[in-house]
Image: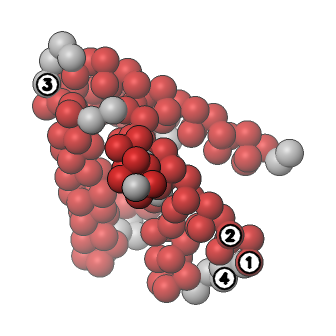
Amino acid sequence: MQKYIWIGLLISFLWGIQTVIHKHLLKHISGISIMVYSSIIYTSLLIIFGYYNRKILIKDSKKINVRIGSIIFFTAVFTLFLTNILYYYILKNHESGIVSSLISASPIFTVVFAYLFLKEQISMYGYVGILSVVIGVILINIDNKDIEYFSH
């Protein structure tokens, strides 16, 4: 198996643990507190990481124009900040497995947007994968009451 697959699985594993840890923490403190305290730690680590990669940052800062800056801003506000607020909101009141499975449907949107905007091709395996993710999310989230409803 190629190295990027192992790294990708490690990321999925860590994100999976994260949801369970966040759900546990939400029993004790608010999502706002988790976001702020986690962000302080994240920012501290990011500053250290940035310091060790300052040559790259300086080089790239010369390439950032209004368009690229706007894209970075939009991404940070809507796909990081807003999604985190929504994530903690739904996680507080719902099972972590359900919330995680709904969020894990993101590859569906990634594949579609990559096709539309980046002109990346979707193979037959890609279509099967999208269908599998959709079916998997439905199966994870279906309630026994839903099954009983349809069986009558």
Of circles 3 and 2, the one toward us is 2
Identify residue type, mark 1.
Met
Residue identifier under label 2: 128
Q: Which residue is mark 4?
A: 121
The numbered mark at residue 30 is 3
- What percent of the width, then of the height, locates residue 119? 58, 86
Image quarter in which the C terminus is found: bottom left
Assign a secondary structure to mark 3.
loop
Disc 4 to disc 3, C-alpha distance: 42 Å
Point 18% across, 13% down: residue:
28
The percent position of residue 22, horizontal first and vertical second, equals 32, 25
Where is mark 1, residue-wise?
124
The N terminus lies in quadrant? top right
Relative height, residue 103 to residue 74 (above, below): above
Q: Secondary structure at mark 1?
A: helix
* Label 4 Cα neighbours within 10 Å, binned few <14 / some 14-19 / many ≥20: few
**86 w.r.t. 74: above or below:** above
* Mark 4 residue element: loop
Q: Is residue 48 above or below residue 138?
A: above
Separation of residues labelled 1 and 4 (CA atoms):
10 Å
Amino acid found under the numbered disc labelled 2: Val
Mark 3, other Cα within 10 Å: few <14 / some 14–19 / many ≥20: some
Kindly identify the residue that appears in the image at 51 percent across and 50 percent down: 139
Question: In terms of sequence position, does the residue under pointer 2 or pointer 4 come before the other?
Answer: 4
Pick whichever of labels 3 and 2 is earlier in the sequence.
3
Labels 2 and 1 touching (C-beta < 8 A) = yes
Label pair 1/4, CB-CB below 8 angstroms: no
Residue count near mark 1 (Cα–Cα under 10 Å), binned few <14, some 14–19, many ≥20: few
Instruction: Give the image location of residue 138, x and y in percent.
Output: 47, 55
Tell me which corner region of the image, top left, top right, bottom left or bottom right, holds residue 62: bottom left
